[in-house]
Image (spheres, rainbow, N blue to C red):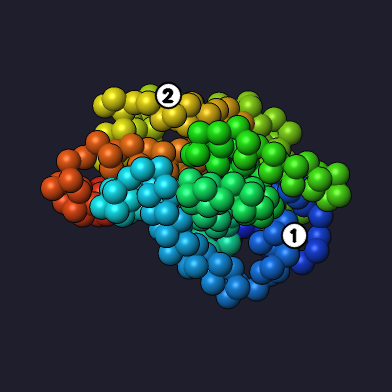
Amino acid sequence: MKLGPDASRYILAGRGEPVARPFNLRWLLPAICGDNGQLWSYAWLLSWPTAAVGAFWWAWGMGATWQVAAATAALLIALPGVLGPAVVRPVGVDLPAMAVTLVAAGFWANGYPIIAIVVAIWAACVKETQPVWLALWVWSPWPLVALVAPAIAAIVRRPAIDPVTANPSLRRVHDHPIRSAFEHRAGRWRDGWLMVAPWGLTLLALVEPTPQVIAALVVAHLQLLVATDTVRLVQTAAGPVMALAAAMFIPAPWLLLAVIVAAFWWRTPELV
């Protein structure tokens, strides 16, 4: 199993060792999976059907027909950023966190807000930013109360410079996130293959964008000011809103063809 820097930190956390911020806030999956690669694989594999069902249920609750809800789920899980690079598969939190948050969105959109908040708290223990995305997906500020989970984790689970972060290049990213983000993406801010093409057919959401679509994209891209990765971050954040808006725009007779076109890569996309 090839482990990237993030995955290595999750393995350290799974062994009970302190890790650097923000990985110290993402304690739930390491607590469950430890340093067992098979358990991480099970969590990653289970996240796919969970995300698909959650996306369908959420889209249905948001007023979509079953055909549009199914297309929403398919367009979402086909996004390259949802798959992510090899170094976060299966030891990673982006896909599992999105999957759990979609379940919370399904509960919210179908009239179960209290259960949604409880599930959102679990999602926030997988990745601390999930209540923000849930608030954008259901278009309500109330899910932000789930941010209490990472706030408590920040007090209880103190960060430390772990052996992975101690690597000089990674320590520099840790200590200077904004500078590192701009240096890493230098010359690529207008690279369409990185910033636009990975969205595929979900770009149809921008034909007549709603305030929700615009807000989701703007907030998702704000992450790029402090992070070196791009596609996997923005698509696991704004992907559901983009997929639903695109599916609603596509005429019903064309939905199946659109899903087939989106499901295949016509050129190897950016995944990171």
- Residue type indicated by callout 1: Ala
- Image quarter of the N terminus: bottom right
Task: Answer whether labels 2 and 1 touch (C-beta < 8 Å).
Answer: no
Answer yes or no: is residue 261 visible: no
For label 2, the SS is helix
The residue mark sitting in front, 2 or 1, is 2
For the residues labelled 2 and 1, the Cα–Cα distance comes to 39 Å
Front-most of residues 174 and 28? 28
* Image quarter of residue 270: top left
**Mark 1 element type:** helix
Q: Is residue 134 above or below residue 24?
A: above
Query: Could you say where residue 130 lies in the image, as x and y percent from the top left?
Result: 60, 44
**Residue annotated with mark 1:** 13
Q: Tell me: 217 left or right of 159.
A: left
Mark closest to the chain's N terminus, 2 or 1: 1
Q: Nearer the viewer, residue 44 or 71?
A: 71
Q: Could you tell me residue 14's position as x and y percent? A: 73, 64
Where is mark 2, residue-wise?
A: 211
Check disc 2: other Cα within 10 Å, few if <14, some if 14-19, many if 20+: few
Residue 79 picture location, percent across and down: 36, 48
Which residue is at 18% across, 46% downward?
Answer: 252
Q: How packed is label 1: few (under 14 Cα within 10 Å), some, or many (20 or more)?
A: many
